[in-house]
Image (cartoon, helix red, strand yellow):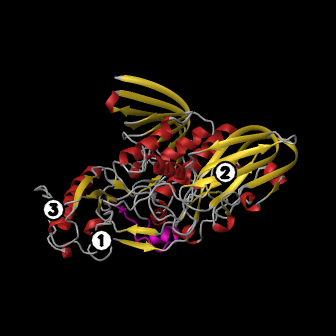
């Protein structure tokens, strides 16, 4: 067996969207980072192995931005056919080509060396390469969902539902238990140009009538999330047991749709079925603070807010598919957005253990709002950025300058509710043709400059000044109604690509006091946040939009220079 040793500033365990965003963010902010993922692809529940679309906060202008929006827009541009393997490659490409980031795939963490409440190293087994990888790091970020470092390090964690009385909540049961939300195996279908027959395997379950699937939406636009089990079992150790049962159910449900009554499915065929269950809940760490239902209802206006949620408190019944007394979940209302503090991502008893994703320090009730993937992604970016700041400033992550962290996150296009982004000193001092683009708020119609062909945004200075770069936020339509990937494939696709509002072609121009001009042109932009390095000495800077992906207006939230 081969053994390899590494040293990093941050080791991220788990390569779902939370872990991937954490690792990329930390690396971008200058610290050596290693991410260890036990699957051959990144993306977790969003990947081709599970195929759940990315959901997040409800409400106008509340879509999550930052690295998660960057990944989704990259996918719209490079993957117009919405192939899941290409989506995998988009996430993989962002990680594998990121400076300061090492990616270890197919590697399962199985051991941790700990001393005096500190993790010294973790060891992972890479089965396809018969190699042990041991990583020493200053910080370890567990973004594995199942909190694999908890049993290995002795970190405090929770499992199951708290009693109502523990946090004064209304959603939990009167008595604490070890029940959770379950896991799902999804399947996908494709429309053909002819009738397609389906013969189920002999071991598939049988559902002869619609009454055999009470309260289960089995129309063709469903993503079949309700094929769910495990909440009454052990969502860590019974994963394979759940998969075996879920696959029988999946084939049985499709057999029912195809062969038991008229469901409009004659020309539809089963294209893919997932053999890796997508999990909702298992171990949750106990952190410096535990966010609860009352915090959700109070909108989470924490002093150390670094991320936000906005999904309803969507509490699935533990019995999942076998729950017979009504709809399989209760949608308890939650404000959108509501804030999440850095403290809920820092271990209470292990000095250098942090975490992001569905395993943060929340109660079961609060988890029902924080567990969706876009929320997990912004938690990951916040955590990776915080870890980098702690390392770069040489202080413990518990003592970092929160205002500085918030400013950095907002500069990286991570929205923090009730906060304004700090404007560059040069932009603030210069004359500008539109104050809207320098108001520190990068979403909402009232904060958007809207122009037409020939229009531009201009800054003027009193003298020639060194300009090192520009920061632009375009409109990627945060209120678009389509997901990052589809749950089905009709002949006429109902999923579109790069938002029409996005500016595709633009120029940055400059002019000095002697009339000399400078120009930087971009012809294939597909990103919302654009940073361009320049080396000019000018007294005038312009952004000149030229072409969108279909909209007849040019829309810009932010244009600053520094």
Q: Quadrant of the N terminus?
A: top left
Residue 511 image offset from top left, x and y in percent: 80, 43
Q: Which residues are magenta?
A: 162-182
| Residue nearer the viewer, 87 or 144 | 87
Residue 441 image offset from top left, x and y in percent: 68, 61
Q: Are marks 3 and 1 in contact (CB under 8 Å)?
A: no
Q: Quadrant of residue 90?
A: top left
Identify the residue under disc 3. Answer: 205
Q: Callout 3: helix, strand or loop?
A: loop
Of callouts 3 and 1, the N-terminal one: 3
Q: Residue furthest left?
A: 202
Identify the residue under disc 1. Answer: 217
Q: Quadrant of residue 463?
A: top right
Residue 208 image offset from top left, x and y in percent: 14, 70
Q: How many marks?
A: 3
Of callouts 3 and 2, the N-terminal one: 3
Residue 467 image offset from top left, x and y in percent: 78, 41
Q: Is residue 174 magenta?
A: yes
Q: For the residues marked 3 and 1, what is the alpha-carbon distance in whole angstroms?
A: 18 Å
Q: Is residue 282 left or right of residue 474?
A: left
Q: Residue at x 28, y 77 (%)?
A: 325
Dot label at residue 235: none
Mark 2 vs mark 1, foreground winner is: 2
Dot label at residue 472: 2
Residue 350 is at least partly visible in this image: no
Q: Magenta segment, principal secondary structure?
A: loop
Q: In this rendering, is residue 215 above or below 205?
A: below
Local crowd size for mark 3, using a 10 Å CA cut-off: few (<14), some (14–19), many (≥20): some
């Amino acid at each position: 067996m081969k053994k390899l040793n590494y040293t990093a500033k941050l080791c991220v365990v788990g390569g779902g969207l939370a872990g991937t965003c954490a690792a990329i963010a930390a690396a971008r902010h200058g610290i050596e980072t290693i991410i260890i993922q036990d699957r051959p692809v990144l993306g977790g529940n969003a990947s081709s192995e599970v195929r759940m679309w990315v959901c997040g906060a409800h409400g106008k202008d509340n879509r999550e931005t930052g690295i998660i929006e960057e990944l989704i827009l990259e996918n719209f541009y490079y993957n117009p056919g919405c192939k899941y393997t290409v989506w995998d490659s988009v996430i993989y490409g962002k990680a594998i080509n990121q400076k300061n980031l090492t990616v270890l795939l197919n590697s399962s963490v199985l051991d941790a060396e700990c001393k005096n409440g500190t993790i010294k190293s973790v060891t992972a087994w890479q089965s396809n390469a018969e190699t042990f990888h041991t990583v020493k790091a200053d910080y370890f970020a567990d973004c594995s969902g199942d909190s694999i470092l908890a049993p290995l390090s002795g970190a405090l964690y929770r499992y199951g539902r708290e009693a109502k009385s523990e946090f004064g909540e209304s959603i939990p049961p009167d008595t604490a238990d070890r029940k959770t939300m379950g896991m799902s195996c999804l399947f996908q279908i494709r429309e053909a140009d002819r009738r397609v027959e389906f013969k189920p395997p002999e071991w598939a379950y049988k559902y002869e009538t619609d009454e055999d699937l009470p309260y289960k939406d089995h129309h063709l636009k469903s993503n079949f999330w309700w094929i769910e089990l495990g909440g009454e079992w052990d969502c860590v150790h019974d994963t394979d047991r759940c998969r075996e049962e879920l696959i029988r159910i999946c084939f049985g449900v499709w057999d029912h749709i195809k062969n038991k009554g008229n469901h409009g499915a004659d020309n539809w065929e089963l294209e893919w079925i997932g053999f890796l269950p997508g999990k909702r809940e298992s171990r949750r760490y106990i952190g410096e603070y535990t966010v609860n239902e009352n915090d959700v209802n109070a909108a989470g206006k924490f002093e150390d807010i670094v991320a936000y949620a906005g999904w309803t408190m969507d509490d699935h019944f533990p019995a999942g598919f076998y729950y017979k007394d009504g709809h399989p979940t209760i949608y308890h209302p939650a404000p959108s957005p509501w804030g999440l503090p850095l403290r809920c991502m820092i271990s209470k008893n292990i000095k250098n253990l942090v975490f992001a994703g569905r395993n943060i320090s929340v109660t079961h009730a609060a988890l029902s709002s924080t567990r969706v993937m876009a929320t997990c992604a912004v938690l990951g970016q916040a955590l990776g950025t915080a870890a980098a700041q702690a390392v770069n400033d040489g202080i413990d992550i518990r003592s970092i300058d929160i205002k500085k962290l918030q400013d950095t996150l907002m500069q990286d296009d991570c929205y923090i509710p009730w906060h304004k982004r700090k404007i560059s000193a040069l932009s603030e001092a210069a004359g500008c043709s539109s104050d809207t683009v320098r108001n520190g708020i990068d979403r909402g119609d009232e904060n958007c400059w809207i122009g037409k062909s020939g229009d531009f945004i201009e800054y003027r200075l009193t003298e020639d000044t060194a300009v090192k770069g520009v920061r632009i936020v375009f409109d990627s339509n945060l209120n678009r109604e389509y997901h990052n990937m589809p749950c089905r494939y009709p002949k006429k696709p109902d999923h579109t690509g790069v938002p029409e509002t996005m500016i595709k072609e633009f120029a940055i121009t400059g002019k000095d006091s002697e009339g000399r001009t400078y120009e930087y042109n971009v012809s294939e932009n597909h990103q919302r946040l654009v940073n361009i390095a320049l080396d000019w000495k000018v007294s005038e800077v312009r952004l000149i939009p030229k072409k969108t992906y279909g909209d007849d207006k040019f829309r810009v939230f932010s244009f600053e220079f520094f």
